[in-house]
Image: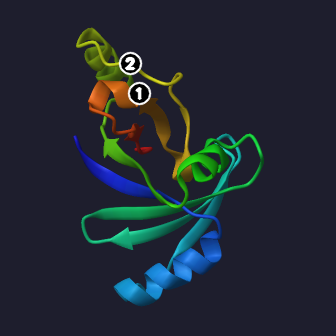
Amino acid sequence: MKIDHIAIAVTDVEASAKIYQDALGIDEIEFETVETEGVKVAIIPMENGRIELMQPTNDSSPIKKFLEKKGQGLHHMALETDDIDGEVERMEGCGVQFLGKVRPGSAGTKVTFIHPKSLEGVLAELCSHPK
C-alpha cells in the first residue's frame, strides 16, 4: 500500500485550487464532480501523490456536514491498493471497521472508507485505480 492522496474540505474549490496552484507552483489542476459522494474535486498532482480539494455539491454531502462541524481543513488520507476487495477482507479480519461498501470514486477508482475509530481518530480512504 502507498499514500494516494490527501483530501482537504473547502467551501470554494475553484478559489482554493487557485491558492494551492500559486503556492505550490502547479501548472494544471483537474476538476471533477463525483455525484456518488456529492462533491466537486480539484485534483492537484504532486510528484509523490495528489492533493484533492473537495467542495460539497448538495446538502446531503458528507463534506457539507464536515465543513459545518469543523470548517475547512484536512478531511482524510487515502491509501492505494491493487486489490481493494482482498485488502478489505484482510483488514476486517484485524478488526478494522468500514463506513459502507466498496463503491465508485473519482477518476474510475473503487473506494471505501475506514472508520476513524479503527485508525486512532483518522478517517482514511482505501482506493484502487483501474488497471
Quick check: marks 1 and 2 in contact, CB under 8 Å?
A: yes
Neighbor class of circle 1 (other Cα within 10 Å; few <14, some 14-19, many 20+) is some
The kind of secondary structure element at disc 2 is loop
Where is mark 1, residue-wise? 115
Give the residue drawn at x 53%, y 51%: 70
Q: Earlier in the sequence, mark 1 or mark 2?
A: 2
Answer with the quarter of the image where residue 10 lies. bottom right
Q: Which image quadrant is residue 115 in?
A: top left
Query: In the rendered structure, which amino acid carries the disc numbered 2?
Result: Gln
Left or right side of 43 for 56:
right
Mark 2 — residue?
Answer: 97
Q: Which colour scheme is used?
A: rainbow
Q: Residues within 10 Å of mark 2 (few under 14, many from 20)?
A: some
Q: Which residue is drawn at 26% across and 10% down?
A: 93
Residue 3 x/y as whole percent: 27, 50
Q: Which of 131 and 23 is in front in this view?
A: 23
Q: How far from the left and from the top, in percent, is residue 54? A: 57, 59
In what element is the residue under mark 1? loop
Compared across the picture, whether 117 is left or right of 93 comes to right
**Image spot of residue 39 (x, y percent):** 65, 53
Q: Which residue is drawn at 49% across and 44% down?
A: 109
Q: Which quadrant does the C terminus fall into?
A: top left
Question: Residues under labels 1 and 2: Cα distance?
Answer: 6 Å
Considering only vertical position in the picture, is 40 above or below 29?
above
Residue at 34% over, 39% down: 122
Residue closest to the far right: 59
Three-letter code for the amino acid on which mark 1 is drawn: His
